[in-house]
Image (cartoon, rainbow, N blue to C red):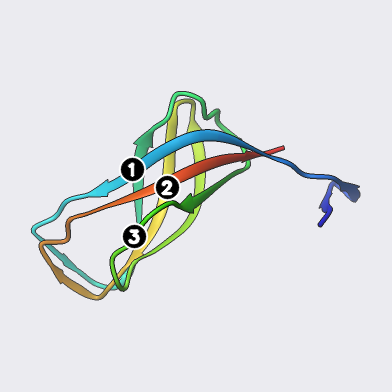
Amino acid sequence: MPLEYDGKLMAASAVSLGDITITYTATLAVGAANRQITVSLPSVKAGDLLSVRVAGPIPDGYNVGSAFCSTDGQLIVVVSHPALVLGANFSIPARVFRIT
């Protein structure tokens, strides 16, 4: 499916930037919301168009959403979580792609 950018149709391709693990640890998490989790990934650059795809099991009630980079080498992944979680610890394997 072509992308439209600045009024022009463009073909898009995805380049794998490698695998990551999205990890979060908290004793208690309250309030259903999105959490921004920063993951070190040297190959990302500020302003990259990115996609993160889950590559393994994900805890019930969690969802991996968008990903972006505002500082070179630091990937920020948005994870939504349930309303109340005791021992909110998780690790989610994922693969990162740069859309070009």
Q: Residue at x 43, y 38 (%)?
A: 19
Residue that protrudes farthest toward the front in the picture? 56
Instruction: Give the residue at mark 2.
Output: 94
Q: Which residue is under mark 1? A: 21
Figure quadrant of the C terminus: top right
Neighbourhood count class around disc 2 (C-alpha, 10 Å): few under 14, some 14–19, many 20 upward: some
Q: Is residue 34 left or right of residue 10?
A: left
Residue found 48% across the figure and 34% down from its top = 18
Give the mark toward the camera: 3 or 1: 3
At label 2, the amino acid type is: Ala
Residue in the image at 16% along x and 70% along y: 85
Going from the N terminus, do you reach mark 3 or mark 1 first? 1
For residue 3, which numbered disc appears in the image? Answer: none
Q: Are circles 2 and 1 on residues that touch, CB within 8 Å?
A: yes
Residue 89 quadrant: bottom left
Which one is earlier in the sequence, the residue at label 2 or at label 1? 1
* Vertical order, 82 against 47 (above or below): below
Left or right: where does residue 1 sit relative to residue 19?
right
Residue 48, image x and y in percent?
Answer: 61, 36
Say which amino acid is labelled 3: Pro
- Could you tell me which secondary element the residue under label 2 belongs to? strand
Residue 17 shown left or right of residue 7 in the figure? left
Rendered location of residue 8, percent (x, y): 91, 47
Look at mark 3 in the image and give the residue it sits on: 57
